[in-house]
Every structure is written in structure tokens, then in C-alpha cells.
Amino acid sequence: MNAAVWFGAAVFFTFLATTVFHQPEILKVLGWSYSGWVAQFLWARYFDLQLWCAGVALLHLVAECVYLGRPLSRFHLFLLAGLLCSSLIGGFLLQPKVKQLHLARFQKDATPQQVKSAERAYPVWNGVTQFLNYLTLVGIMIYLWQVTGLNAQNRFGSKFRS
């Protein structure tokens, strides 16, 4: 269930929630500065959700190994570790930098040089963040595919320990 919620939230955020703030109707009402500020707020919450879901998935993997006596799957472990690392990089490195650049672009007391520098750097950092988001989405899709596999012998061991 965690994988399905995680994948659904990632698809919703990537293809619906973030695109809303670039629509002409929203930009007329909010303008670029406020529209971007709300989008940055959503990005922060999205990376929080990513961290929680990755943590729950790792705990679930360890619990399966302990309680079901299954050997630890290296593929799942590395996939989840990679997804957790991408969430950490996105949430603690990229998203704050993009937010800082967005604020610098629309700050009233900023010098023209600061604004121009922020306007040049913003698309690059935002693109890197988007690329990482798409890469994470693919990883979550692979993880969802793996945990919802129909091969019961591989998924659940034949004996259960309590």
C-alpha cells in the first residue's frame, strides 16, 4: 500500500499539481512571484512525503526479512536506498536552492545584478530538480512493479515466524 500511495502521489504532483501553477489563469490571479512561491511550498511538502514513503518502504523491507525469514533482496535495498538518497538530495540540496533563487528573482530590494544572476541560474537548478523528480518517479514505478508481483513464492516465504 505504501508503494501505491508513493507512486500515486508522485504522479499527481509531477503531472498535475506543479503544472497548475504555470497555467495562464493562475498566473493572471497570482502572478509569477506568488505562483512560484506556492509551487515551492508544494515542492517542500512533496520531498517530505518522499522521505516518509522511502523510510516506510525500507522499514517494510527489513520487517519482511526479520519476520518472514526472507533473505534481504539487494535489488530492493539498493533501489530504496537510491530513492531515499534522491529524496534527501532533492529536499535538502536542490529544493532550497531553487526556492532561494526564486525569491531572489522577485525580491524588491535586490540589485539588478542579483536578479539577472538568479534568472540565469533558476532554470538550470529547476531543470536538475525536475530531472531528479522524473528519475525518482521511474524508480518508484519499478519498486511498485516489484512489490506487487504475482509470484507468491518470491514475495512471501513458505513459513511465517512471529
Image (spheres, rainbow, N blue to C red):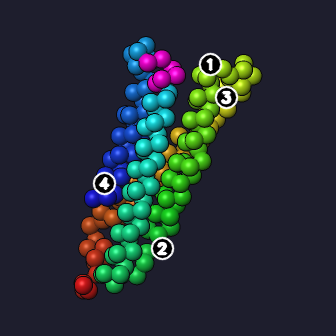
Q: Is residue 155 left or right of residue 85?
A: left
Specify whether residue 24 is in view. no
Which percent across, then down, holds residue 34?
48, 23
* Residues packed near mark 4 inside 10 Å, few (<14), some (14 to 19) or many (20 plus): some
Name the residue at 30% across, 65% down: 149
Q: Is residue 80 left or right of residue 101?
A: left
Which percent across, then down, holds residue 135?
51, 49
Looking at numbered disc 3 in the image, what kind of residue is underneath it? Answer: Ala
Residue reaching furthest to the right: 113
Circle nearer the viewer, 4 or 1: 1
**Residue 31 magenta:** yes
First to last magenta residue range: 30-35
CA gap between label 4 and label 2 equals 21 Å
The numbered mark, 1 or 2, whose residue comes first in the sequence reads: 2
Judge whether 95 appears above or below 136 on screen: above
Judge whether 31 appears above or below 66 on screen: above
CA gap between label 4 and label 1 equals 43 Å
Circle nearer the viewer, 2 or 3: 3
Name the residue at 49% across, 29% down: 37
Q: Main secondary structure of the magenta part?
A: helix
Task: Tell me the number on the disc at residue 108.
Answer: 1
The numbered mark, 2 or 3, whose residue comes first in the sequence reads: 2
Circle nearer the viewer, 4 or 3: 3
Task: Tell me the number on the disc at residue 118.
Answer: 3
CA gap between label 1 and label 3 equals 13 Å
Looking at numbered disc 1 in the image, what kind of residue is underneath it? Answer: Lys
